[in-house]
Structures are given as C-alpha cells and as structure tokens.
Image: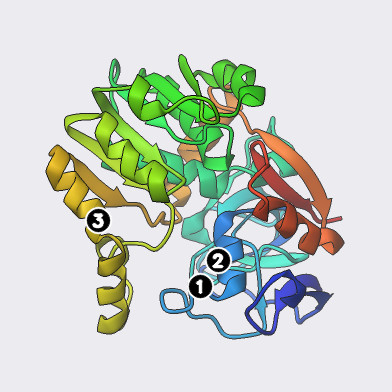
Amino acid sequence: MKAAYIERYGPNDAVQIGFLPQPQPGPHDLLVRVRAASVNPIDLAIRSGRLRPILPYRLPLILGSDLSGEVVAVGSAVTRFAVGDEVFARLDKDRIGAFAEYALVGEKEAAHKPARLTHVEAASIPLVGLTAWQALTEIGHVSPGQKVLIQAGSGGVGSIAIQLAHSLGAEVATTVSARNEALVRELGAQTVIDYRTQRFDELLSDQDFVLDTQGGDVLARSFKVLRRGGTLVTINGAPTPQAVRERNIAWPVRLGLAATHIKDYRLARRYHVKFAYLFMRPDGKQLEVLGAMLQDGTIRPVIDRVFSLDETREALAYSETGRATGKVVIEVP
C-alpha cells in the first residue's frame, strides 16, 4: 500500500512517499480503507523526534493520527462494526499510521462517520474534537453562563472548542487575527480580541476557564484573566508527569517534564487557580457524541486546505507555518 512514512526522525525531508506492507487486523481491530486523514501538531512533533521519550515508535513509521474511511475487514472479536461501515477515529497513540491507503483502528477508538459529512470533513474532527471535549467537560466542567477564553480560536482545536463551549451555554471569548473575526463570531464567540493589536489580559478578567493552545508568554498571561478557583488547561509543549502518568516513562524523563512546568505551577498558586496539561486520549464513545453533534449541525468542521497523499510533505510544511484557519486534510484517492 502507498503511505507517507519516516525511516529517521528529522525535518520534512525525512518524510517519504512509498509502498509498505498492508497491515493485518488483530482480534479487536478494524482494517480501514483510508479516504482522508488530517494533519495535527502532534504529527510534526512525532516526525521531529521531540516525543520519542514519551511515544517511542519502531521505524519505519507511518505518520498520521486521525482518519475517516471505510471498514474492509474486522477482527474476530469486533462486535460494533461490520465490513462496509464508514468510520472516523483518532488512532491509538501507540499505533498511528493514518497517512496511508489502509490503517488499523482499534474498535474502542472508532465511531460511525456522520452521514452528512464527507470523509474530508470527518477526518478533520477526531483529534481536535476529542481534545476540546475533554478539556471543556472533563477538566473544565464548563456549564451554562460561565466565561470561557479559547486561545487561537481560528486554529484546529480552537475552532471546534468555540463551538463546543457555545453549545454548553458558555460566554465565549477568543483571540484571533482581524481577518478571522467574522469566522469565530459565526462559530459562537461573543468577545473577539485581535492578538496583533490588543492584549487579552488587559481586556478580560474573571474567566472561569481558559484553553491555551499557544504556550509561552500567552500561557503565562492566561493565568491573570482567571477568577479565583478557575481552571487553565494547556495542550502546548511538553506534557506534565500527571498527564502521562499511565505511560511507562523513565524517572529522568518525568523529572524533566516536571521541570518544564515549574513556572506554570507557581503561577497557578499565585493566582489561586487550577492548572492542567491535557494529553488527549482516543475515545470512540466520546467521538460518537461528537458525531451526533456534527450530524445535527450543532458543530461543523472548519477546513483550510486539502492535499493529496503524494503531497504529504507539503501538507506538513503548510501546517507548520501556523497560518492555517481550521484544519489541513490529506485526501487519499
């Protein structure tokens, strides 16, 4: 089968387009004919080798973390899906490989594709949708009337998080460039801050929840806008040891992860707020919930550009610029 893969870690020129053996499903697997797969920051981090201490993979490694496609074979223990079903999924972190003609999907990670969506649209959702959902509902416990700030609201996670927060009844603020103001207001943001000309930490206060996707100075300033007892969740940079506690990670690596967030924990204590890093987990049941919301129009995909499988290097390079509005998707012919 044709696939986009790496035999060494490094920049984009490490990515190859070639042919590798088609995977065979185990008892709990679906073999999916991939129709589309989306590009996410984690793909860039995996390609570069930055996540090797946390996510060690055997090379050659097919890249790609979420997909949409058709089931062409099922394992002997699969009960929820059958050959011919259209599914979308965020692949298990230990077994990625969506940038290919075929991929294995664990039954627990898969969900039925919403009928109203194309495969390109459906592929854009799993990773960012689950990230936003888990941040808002499991950690933030966002409820009607609360104030929520979504950083970088026109990005992949941000564009879905705005819609989900709005559907939960929150009052949503977001940061974007001026060219994307109309988009994020359409998605449900009531307060829009142009990050190029305005400082969100001078305009906002008493927020109940902040979702940070930027890290660095943006993360540090986000603590200031929370009310006492509020919650800040970040998905940028290295995870905290707590976020990856279920993984078998060496103690030196855990200590290194803790050291990267010393400043964040100090700021959390200073402002009397909760701080957490979200290391999103695949979850087919949650994806079914998101699928129902996509089917009834509560949320919708936001897609910037579509590339072919042969153009995977170009898709990764474009995503790496950080200029995409919504998602970048790879279509597999």
Can you say whether 187 is above or below 7 in the image?
A: above
Residue 200 horizontal/vertical position (percent): 40, 27
Q: Position of residue 259 (x, y in %)?
A: 26, 68
Task: In the rendered structure, find residue 50 and report the number of the disc placed on it.
Answer: 1
Quadrant where the image shows the C terminus? bottom right
Under tag 3, what secondary structure? helix
Q: Are marks 1 and 2 in contact (CB under 8 Å)?
A: yes
Residue at the spot of label 3: 263
What's the mark number on residue 45? 2
Q: CA distance from mark 1 to mark 3?
A: 21 Å
Mark 3 burial class by Cα count in 10 Å: few <14, some 14-19, many 20+: few
Give amino acid for label 3.
Lys
Check disc 2: other Cα within 10 Å, few if <14, some if 14-19, many if 20+. some
User: How far across and down, in percent of the image, does residue 297 sit?
Assistant: 59, 22
Of circles 2 and 3, the one toward us is 3
Residue 314: image quadrant is bottom right
Determine whether the residue tagged by mark 2 lies in a helix, strand or loop: helix
> Going 45% across and 35% down the picture, which residue do you hit?
151
> In the figure, is residue 106 to the left or right of 308?
left
Work out whether residue 317 or residue 79 is closer to the camera in this orientation and state it: 317
Residue shown at the point (69%, 30%) measured from the top left: 116
